[in-house]
Image: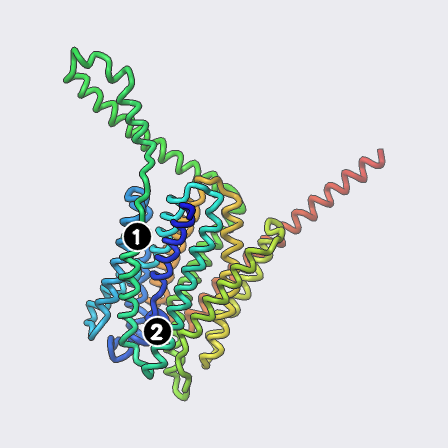
Amino acid sequence: MKKWKKTTYMVAIYLFLLEFRPLEPFMTAYLTGPDANLSLNEVATTIEYLKTYASLLTSVLMFMTADYFLYKPNIILLTVCPCVSYFLMTGAPSDTQLRVSAFGIGTIYSGNMIAFCYLYAKIEDVEQYQMATGIVTAASQLGKVVGDFSAQIIVSATGGIYTILPYCNIFSLLLALIWAYLFPSVEQKNDRLKSKESCENSSLLIYGVENETKNIEVYRNTIKIDKEYKTEIFLSKEIWMNFKSSYSNPIVLKKSLWYIVGMAAYILVLSNINILYSYVIKIPGNHDVLSNGLAESIVTLSGAAGAYLIGKVHYDWARYGDMFTAFCSIVMGTLMMSCYFYHKLIFIYLAYILFGLICQMHFVIIYADIAKQLKKQCYSLVIEFNYFGSLIVVTILTLILIQYNIMYITIPGRFLFIGGLFSMLGIIFLFICIYDIKKKIKHYNDYSKWFILLLTF
């Protein structure tokens, strides 16, 4: 087996185990049930904002340390933390245990990103990136689907008892931890070490060593520090120049702005959809039965299918991409706002399934449009900054909508707000399309006038 395939399958198995978490679709039901005995308001506020803050803090730590530790230690850490957190949720956990576990669970969201970083670091042939990414993404989605189906089967078989679900998560994460420990380490390739070595072997440093050893040693250490400092300054300037040049591209800038806000809204949907389910079934006169696991499975499968199909579509996205973005954003906004008015789970499930399908299709186009405009060394810089920006937006919105709720928005009202964000993005891109069309018409008219003037001569 080729080396890149072996690496790909190892990461794919890890992400399958990481995403196999049957508790997730029934997290709110478990926390508000007899095991944890929290109120719906506590889950919707305290637990959710702790997860958000943990995700933000973890993303910063991972961006700062992952390259230095070469990914594998980070992957192990990001597997241990949620494993311990789910263990704290078992039995009859106290409020403190639940808060600590919520913070630990929030760290798992960076596991996917660091696993992809490890994948790219281990694969030397960049031509294999696309196929490797497809295989690993499919495995990740499959893990979610199998986990959701398993959750629905367990809940249905036990008559609505969720006690066993945290243990399923722990078992899967323990297997993922063992598998991550077996990962081959990434070989260190540090240009700064080469630079320092060449400085040590230079004639300036070795001149007169035999006669003035002590003085030259002091001088050599000074040169080392100076060279390392200059290397750090050079790397910082290079990162800044790459950052500046990337976002100077109007396509990268506008697509990145959509990604930052759109991904933030998407994260809010994922973190609040279970809360909405539990809110709806507690409406007086509602006799719906939770089928969260089945619904999540369909959402994941439809999203995976949509992403696969849109990836095979050959279209002039540079020309019609903004119109596609405007259309998808408005439709996603409409679907989310409609959840505010529904009092039956079946309608919310259908809206969520359609939302997941369109959202995954659009993310594929957004990623592709950004990647096509970037230099190779700028891809991770831009995508990681965009993801960090989306977490900042999520944190701000969490403060506004959940922790302090300064706008006094109800749980269904959150989806009205989230839908408004998507619709706002759609309207902005619609105006961009209109502006581009007008600019092209004006350019065409100017060209026609010059052509007619040329014919008169």
Q: Toward which corner of the image does residue 154 lie, by quadrant?
A: bottom left
Task: Residue 11 in the image: state x and y as whole percent.
Answer: 37, 53
Task: Residue 97 in the image: state x and y as whole percent.
Answer: 20, 67
Query: Which residue has dot 2 on it?
Result: 26
Task: Specify the farthest residue to the left.
Answer: 214
Closer to the camera in the image, 242 or 395: 242
Q: In this rendering, does residue 410 appear at all? A: no
Q: In this rendering, does residue 191 appear at all? A: yes
Decide: is 457 above or below 106. above
Task: Specify the farthest residue to the front.
Answer: 1
Task: Residue 165 in the image: state x and y as whole percent.
Answer: 30, 73
Identify the residue at image location x=46%, y=81%. 344
Mark 2: give few (<14), some (14-19) or many (20+) Cα within 10 Å.
many
- Give the quadrant of the C terminus: top right
Q: Is residue 377 left or right of residue 232?
A: right
Q: Toward which corner of the image does residue 281 lie, by quadrant?
A: bottom left
Q: Amino acid type of disc 1?
A: Ile
The residue tagged with tag 1: helix, strand or loop?
helix
Q: Amino acid type of disc 2?
A: Phe
Closer to the camera in the image, 8 or 112: 8
Query: Which residue has dot 1 on it?
Result: 75
Mark 1: give few (<14), some (14-19) or many (20+) Cα within 10 Å.
many
Q: How many marks?
A: 2
